[in-house]
Image: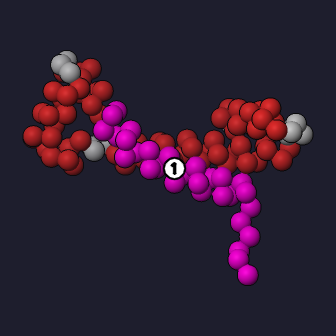
Amino acid sequence: SPIAIPPVVIGFMAGAGGGAAQAIVMAPTSYLVTATTSNGGSVFDAAQDILSREGLRGIYRGAPAVAARQATNWASRQGFTELVRPRIHIAGAPGEIIAGTLGGVF
């Protein structure tokens, strides 16, 4: 028989996976914003410069830190949402909104 995994654990795991996957988009975006803010110019100029000097690996500098940040952020958000959801005794969308809001606060 399948292993029963509590919804709270699934929420933490799914949140961590989704948050880490966000690093695919967030790492280059954060790096380019920082490069543009520090050096001036456009985002496209910064991307072209970084790609020509360092290749695709350069554009993902800092990706592990972004993945760790996003994974912990989303794991706690999803996990706590699942933790409070059964304790919210309001049906439908209002209950879901309250559960999600409380999950985001914690």
Tell me which segment is drawn in magenta: 1-30
Disc 1 designates what residue? 18
Left or right of residue 21, residue 81 in this image: right
Where is residue 96? Give x, y as percent: 76, 38
Where is residue 65? Give x, y as percent: 39, 44
What secondary structure prevails in the magenta region? Answer: helix
Left or right of residue 45, residue 73 in this image: right
Q: Quadrant of the N terminus?
A: bottom right
Amino acid bearing label 1: Gly
Q: Relative to the observer, which residue lies in front, 44 or 39?
A: 44
Look at the image and say whether residue 52 sits in the magenta stretch.
Answer: no
Left or right of residue 4, residue 46 in this image: left
The quadrant holding residue 61 is top left
Q: Residue at x 78, y 35 (%)?
A: 93
Q: Residue at x 74, y 61 (%)?
A: 6
Look at the image and say whether residue 15 sits in the magenta stretch.
Answer: yes
* Residue 5 drawn above or below residue 35: below
Q: Residue furthest right?
A: 89
Q: Quadrant of the C terminus?
A: top right
Q: Residue furthest bottom?
A: 1
Q: Relative to the observer, which residue lies in front, 44 or 76?
A: 44
Q: Residue furthest front?
A: 92
The quadrant holding residue 7 is bottom right
One can see residue 54 in this view: yes
* Residue 77 drawn above or below residue 13: above
Report the label total.
1
Q: Residue at x 49, y 42 (%)?
A: 70
Secondary structure at numbered mark 1 = helix
